Image (spheres, rainbow, N blue to C red):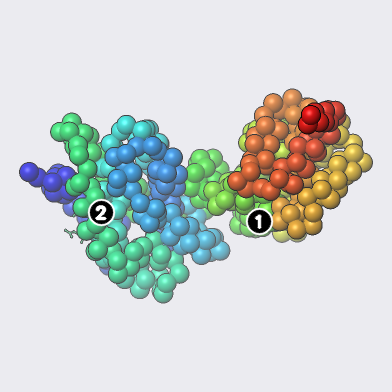
Amino acid sequence: METLMDRLKIETREHHQYLESLPFFTILMEEKLPLESYVGLLRAMAVVHAVLEHELPLLANPVISAVWQEEMRRLPFLEKDLSFIETKNIGDVPEAAKHALQLAEKIRLWSTPNSVNLLGCLYVLEGSTLGAQVLRPKIAKLFNLRTEGLSYLSSYGNDTAPRWKKFKQRMNAVDLSEQQRKTVVETAHEVFQGMTKIVSALYPIELNSDYFASTLNPEAGVHPVTNDPRELFAAIDAGNKTWNAYPYFKWRYGDRGKRFTKSDSAWLVTLSNLPQDSVHHEVEWLGKVLASRGMPQFLLQKHLENLYQALVKSVPERRDKYDKLLKAAEKLQTARRNQISDTLFETLTEEFERMVGPSWSKRLNGAGAILVAAVADEQAGIKKAVTSLEEWMTDSSRFPKKWIDAVQVILRKTRRQPPDPPAPADK
Ligand code: HEM
């Protein structure tokens, strides 16, 4: 019987031929492709892979688990290339970003425990490692790249052929009904179509110097972020500063959280163009969203302060505009003070740090303040502010008993609850 992989190859052959013949690739072969087109491809693929690789490990889908392996992740390669390129101020191709988001949306819909669609998607994306080997030397020569900026195209390097062979074996070993095989092939068609739209949008292009949030964070939408590189870099710097000041971010939210810090930070800059009331309104909205996900509004206040400083340093002539962000930070601070005074805030924070001891206090610097601030948010009406944090902060697989006890004591004291009654004495 025809294997699944043979069928996929035969039935998508025309699609592949069409894709290969697009001007993007022909002009690349002539070594005339603009850098924006290449960077646009990396950004678009990052959007697609970010969603796919976020969804895959969460899926309890035995068919997909039989094929997907962690070592097939390609987002890390794309991230590496994009962080190298981030320093080079290269504009976006919005049309390509739009098609990438559309494909990413389809991937989200295909990510269910019983569907086989993602096999078709994995086929197309894994197969593209083969074509990448043809493209890599051309891109390297054209843009004078040695290794940096080429990670995605290199992906598995010399292992590409053996990995493809093993991928084929895993795909062919999956037991599928005829209907399911059909679904896999149809999905591969759809992914080829999506890729065709992306690649067609990437050449020829009208150069555009706008930035979209998806450029900074493949999982964010195409809402505009600042297109002034000075502001953009200030936003990234401030994001890094806030991120590094609270190790809790990295520990809990990992690389994905860092990408959101960047895109949210760049979006916050655009707020400075709005009237003050609207700035407050938007900040309040973001503050509530973040607080419900375990990041008290106190952290947003700190970030807005860092952002203000970075922006004023970078573009001093726009200080008046950036003042609006500082005012939003002040408003968050006042709201917190209305619940918990500065003196109480400091006393409780210090008590927490003492209880956990210097080594843990340093390890999760600022955790005491985060806990106390979460109670302030809860008292101000953000229901999940404490629960979303407490669960993580009292997980015994992560923290020693001393830490968990300290978290509970501080939450109770901040909420002004009486301590637990002593356990009954043994008889
Ligand atoms: C985004 C663009 C591309 C995608 C998604 C893609 C996808 C694929 C897929 C799915 C396969 C596996 C075919 C099979 O079943 O054996 C493949 C193989 C291959 N592709 Fe592409 N491809 C792309 C671009 C290109 C380009 C531009 C070239 C060349 C200029 C190319 C050259 C190749 C080659 C040489 C193979 C190996 C064929 C074989 O060993 O039989 N691809 N590609």
Q: Residue at x 40, y 66 (%)?
A: 150
Q: Is residue 258 left or right of residue 414?
A: left
Image: 204 above or below 336: below
Q: Residue at x 18, y 52 (%)?
A: 17
Sequence order check, earlier mark of 2 and 1 = 2
Q: Is residue 177 left or right of residue 97?
A: left
Judge by depth and name the residue closer to the eye, 327 or 45. Answer: 45
> How far is disc 2 from disc 1 in space, using C-alphas?
38 Å
- Figure quarter occupied by ligand 1: bottom left
Q: x, y (%) of residue 385?
A: 70, 32
- Secondary structure type for disc 2: helix
Residue 122 visible? The answer is no
Q: Which residue is mark 1?
A: 240
Q: Which residue is mark 2?
A: 167
- Most extreme residue toward the right, as rendered? 343
- Most extreme residue toward the left, as rendered? 1
Q: Residue at x 45, y 57 (%)?
A: 76
Using the rendered view, name the quadrant where residue 105 is placed: top left
Q: x, y (%) of residue 216?
A: 54, 51
Q: Amino acid at mark 1?
A: Asn
- Secondary structure type for disc 1: helix
Judge by depth and name the residue closer to the eye, 92 or 49. Answer: 49
Quadrant of the snapshot with the N terminus: top left
Q: Residue at x 34, y 64 (%)?
A: 156
Q: x, y (%) of residue 110?
A: 34, 35
Residue 9 visible? The answer is yes
Q: Is mark 1 within 8 Å of ligand 1?
A: no
Q: x, y (%) of residue 396?
A: 63, 43
Q: Amino acid at mark 2?
A: Phe
Image: 245 above or below 194: below
Sort mark 2 into few (<14), some (14-19) or many (20+) by Cα contacts within 10 Å. Answer: many
Q: Nearer the viewer, mark 2 or mark 1?
A: 2
